[in-house]
Image: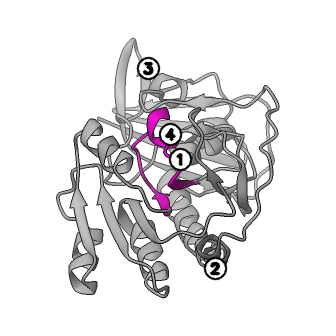
Amino acid sequence: MNGMRPESIVIVGTGRLACNCLEACLGYALPVTCVESEKQAFSPLAALCRKRGVKYEMILERERLANLFLSITKPTLVVSSFNYFLFPRKVLENRALNVINFHNSLLPEHRGRNAPSWSIFAMETATGVTWHQVHAEVDTGDIIAQKQIEIGPDITALELTLKTLDVAAQMFQEILPSLASGSYSCTRMVRSGKESLHRAADVPNGGMLDLGWGIEKAYAFLRAMDYGKFRVFPAPKVRILERDLPVASYRFERSASTVTDGISIALSGKQLALSNGDKKLLLNCE
């Protein structure tokens, strides 16, 4: 699809990235439409569209949304920006459309949903952002741009997600001139055969903290599950005295003491303390 100069732009997505993409697109003499496919209690994108005089629709029915894209006949750039609508093959076969997507990993690693969680849970030191063409198979299209992001030792899934959104917005501004002119190029995504596909229902280790893990792995698990007030996953649980208790909060402490082999476990009421020399992980259970 690259090489096609668009006559209009459709942004389908939600939240801060969709808003940033809209602001960037308004710098071009092209009509822009914004679409959200998930119900929002409050939509910053809808508010921004009202302020900027941009056409906005919330379309929750998947077939109706597909029909919207099927009805487009003029060359159109479709920007999927933090969007959970999976474009069906019949939509992607509409030759008037050039559909690109943001993904918060270095594809082809961690395809699918909640990629920051899986990067943290895997204890990786880096992840990234990918803008790519949309193909019928999830997160497999040719790569337009990628940028690596460091994963800090204490970062949570929410913090990493927000970081990827900010990097993605900056990248979109950089590639938009070539997208708008149809002059951009792509790199074929090299499939290793080892990459994973995570679905919305998938949860790291089924949501259970394994007391047989090392402390760093247990801490990575809790950070991977941590989206703050947003309930992306159910509350993580730990099995204590044959009971599965939700973890209400956690704290990780480091000291300068000598590292020792093995992990000690101490239980006081519903507070669980895991320690290993210079590291301590405190869990407050419900």
Q: Secondary structure at mark 4?
A: loop
Kind of residue sitting beneath label 1: Arg
Q: Which residue is mark 2?
A: 177
Q: Tell me which label, 2 or 4, sits earlier in the chain.
A: 4
Q: Secondary structure at mark 1?
A: helix
- In the rendered structure, the answer to whether residue 28 lies left or right of residue 51 reads right
Closest to the observer, 256 or 155: 155
Q: Which residue is mark 4?
A: 113
Residue 79 is one of the magenta-drawn residues? yes
Observer-side mark, 1 or 4, equals: 4
Residue 250, horizontal then vertical, whole percent: 45, 47
Q: Which residue is mark 3?
A: 239
Observer-side mark, 2 or 4, equals: 2
Q: Residue at x 24, y 42 (%)?
A: 64
| CA separation in Å, label 2 and label 4 | 29 Å
Q: Which residue is mark 1?
A: 223
Q: Secondary structure at mark 3?
A: strand
Residue 120 — which label? none
**Image quarter of the N terminus:** bottom right
Q: Which residues are magenta?
A: 76-102
Kind of residue sitting beneath label 4: Arg
Q: Residue at x 42, y 75 (%)?
A: 22
Residue 270, horizontal then vertical, whole percent: 34, 33
Task: Kindly check if marks 3 and 2 are in contact, taking CB atoms under 8 A apart as contact.
Answer: no
- In the rendered structure, the answer to whether residue 11 lies left or right of residue 114 reads left
Q: Residues within 10 Å of mark 3 (few under 14, many from 20)?
A: few
